[in-house]
Amino acid sequence: MLGSATAHARNRCVEVSDTVGEHVCSSYGDSWSIERKLPVTFRFGLRYAELSTDGLSFKESFKSKDRPKGYVGYSYAGEALGTPTLSGVGGDGGFTFLVVGQLYTGVDGGLALGSTRTATFTTGKHTLSDSSGVDVLFLHGGVPVGYRIPLGRASLRGEVLFGGVLAAVSQRYEVEGRRDTASATAGRWLVEPRVAGDIWFTQHVTFGAYAGVNLLDSRGHALGLTFAWHHRAFDGDMSLW
Amino acid sequence: MREDLSFARVARVIVASSSLAGISGVMGCHVGMAFAVAGSALDQPPYRAEAIAAELGPSSVRTIGCLDVGLAIYERDHRELVDVHVGNRCGHPESLDLGKLAIQGVDTAGRPRLITLHDPRNEIIPLHVGAAEKGRERFRMENAHDLTRLCFDLEAIAPDAPAARPAPLCFERHTGWLPARGGLT
């Protein structure tokens, strides 16, 4: 009773004993048993992604207060950019948890930046032209569902990422004698099957790589390198059989 | 009108998916990185075979299947405590049932006595030691006062190694508890 009275001071559990049966903040087996460890994995890494411009509908994104009253933003089809794909490099990450056996799901997302050379074209009253430097931004997010095959110190994974990708392209524009830079955004659903491989560096840490294609985009490819921390040692299983 | 409605619907879908992508993209990256780095930094290294024997001395350790199990006995505040160290040598989880640990003591008059681990919450249930994991649990032994000798029979604590026949681990009280040669007598 004394333990429970003092253990939760200021909402932070303070352990009062190091002996089983007298712990107030932990339980027997917390530090070593797989049953007491949530099968959660956190990961982050590098991602290179390509996105086809075909079929994308870009729309200028702007704040009303930054434009004259009644201003109508520009929009155009992705093909008008004059480049078949947009590409970017950046970071991605997320977390997954084992649902049953080695079947997992979770949340995954990332951000990538790139550069592209776009055509000069007119849409409505706007004339758009290439903006130098970093002018492509990708944001992607979704839910991965996958299965891990343990191969000893390595593992092979097949997964599918269900989600969406947002592409933003920055361009110079000219309208009614006014020149500025603005960005237009377009979205696409993502159904990205991936093949991934991991190497265990410790019982909790893996380095890996993946390659994926977006089934909804003929030129939508992605490659990634990942670093992951697995709360449950070897995800509970590293054996071949 | 039909076109406007269709465009509005598409725009809403795009905005919704973009927001989702943006939020989970940025969040996913940050959350994944923060927890992966923190977890890795706090990680303990994988268990190496014989590491417990190196720490406690080989006469305090038995290997049962994949598990190295080591014991250390001592007295604190007039209570007899036992530290159970366990390490999994293998790449898969191994079951450990410390509820099956059989403990017998000998008192100062030479009489045998059965000893149990203090478990008021019935916590000591069969669990699996994670692959390459190491752990330690501290138990109070009940009915363990005035003993001169303690023997721990580990034969039934590793259900995944039913054929293992580890010799009992025995300890004698001198100034403190030290590993003993031989069995209970």
Image (cartoon, coloured by chain):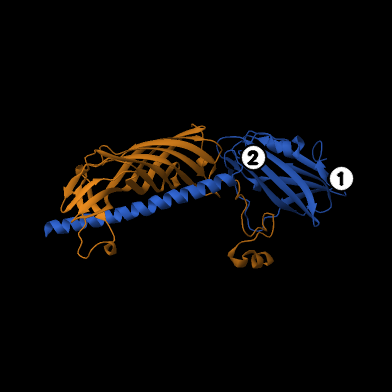
Residue visible at 63% across and 40% down in the picture: B158
B68 in relation to B2, above or below: above
Quarter of the image with the N terminus of chain B is bottom left
Q: Is A21 situated left or right of A50 in this image? A: right
Q: Label 1 neighbourhood size at 10 Å, few (<14), some (14-19), many (20+)?
A: few
Q: Chain of mark 2?
A: B
- The amino acid sitting under disc 1 is His
Query: Is B51 or A207 nearer to us in this picture?
Result: A207
Tell me residue B120's x, y (percent): 66, 58
In the image, which lettered chain appears blue? B
Residue visible at 76% across and 49% down in the picture: B114
In the image, which lettered chain appears orange? A
On the question of residue A223 being in view, the answer is yes
Q: Is A59 situated left or right of A222 in this image? A: left
Query: Is A171 or B135 nearer to us in this picture?
Result: A171
Quarter of the image with the C terminus of chain B is top right
- The amino acid sitting under disc 2 is Gly
Q: Which residue is mark 2?
A: B87
Q: Is B86 situated left or right of B23 in this image? A: right
Q: Secondary structure at mark 1?
A: loop
Q: Label 2 neighbourhood size at 10 Å, few (<14), some (14-19), many (20+)?
A: many
Residue visible at 79% across and 49% down in the picture: B74
Q: Secondary structure at mark 2?
A: strand
Q: Chain of mark 1?
A: B
Tell me residue A100's x, y (percent): 44, 45
Tell me residue A65's x, y (percent): 28, 64
On the question of residue B154 being in view, the answer is no
Q: Which residue is mark 1?
A: B174
Of labels 2 and 1, earlier in sequence is 2
